[in-house]
Image (cartoon, rainbow, N blue to C red):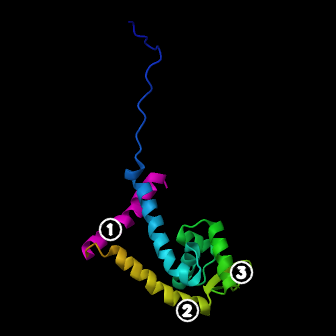
Amino acid sequence: MTSITSSTPPAPEQPSLDLEQFLPYRISVLSNRISSNIARVYGERYGMAVTEWRVMAVLALYPGLSAGEVSERTAMDKVAVSRAVARLLERGFIQRETHGDDRRRSVLHLSEAGVEVYQVVAPMVLECERRLLAPFSEEEQRVLNRLIDRLAAEGLPSMTGK
């Protein structure tokens, strides 16, 4: 019996990508799971989505931001922020005002109702964070935070070339 050989050279070996070991994928999955669990806390009580809570949390710390500035601070898409802002305005949790001298610029603030919601929800989500980090010692938590900061400051820019 004769063997037939192909004249086509073998294809180069394809790189193997195991998503379960791919750090960006793992971080994304972990982030989604954490966000979903925390979202239940304010979602069940106030019917808010993750994007809405993030807008409120940023405005609690940085009142007077524009929607574009909220988008930059949260790394959320401008359309997602715009929709969240519209829902929060409709529900009376935030207020929009024109900015002093520049009538074209509008800024956002938590309303009185928004401040009340924030004061209830913030301790609840902080407790979620505490439980999430409970398996780690204080030193391990500091190391984790340093590594995350370093990835953001050094790893991400070197990955994207920016």
Crowd rating for badge 3 (residues with CA inside 10 Å; few <14, some 14–19, many 20+): few
Magenta segment's dominant SS is: helix
Horizontal side of residue 111 vs 134, given as left or right? right
Q: Quadrant of the N terminus?
A: top left
Relative image position of residue 53 (x, y in whole percent): 55, 78
Q: Amino acid at mark 3?
A: Asp
Label 1 secondary element: helix
Q: Nearer the viewer, residue 96 or 20?
A: 20
- Judged by depth in the image, the label closer to the viewer, 2 or 1, is 2
Horizontal side of residue 24 vs 80, given as left or right? left
* Magenta segment: 138-162
Reading the image, the residue beneath label 2 is: 116
Relative image position of residue 153 (x, y in whole percent): 41, 63
Residue 144, disc:
1
User: Which residue, as the protein is rendered here, is positioned at the far top?
Assistant: 1
**Mark 3 or mark 1: which comes first in sequence?**
3
Cα gap from disc 2 to disc 1, whole angstroms: 32 Å
Dots 3, 1 in contact, CB < 8 A = no
Asked whether residue 137 appears in the rendered view, the answer is yes
Residue 102, disc:
3
Which residue is at 27% across, 70% downward? 140
Which residue is at 63% across, 74% downward? 84
Dots 2, 1 in contact, CB < 8 A = no
Q: Amino acid at mark 1?
A: Leu
Cα gap from disc 3 to disc 2, whole angstroms: 30 Å
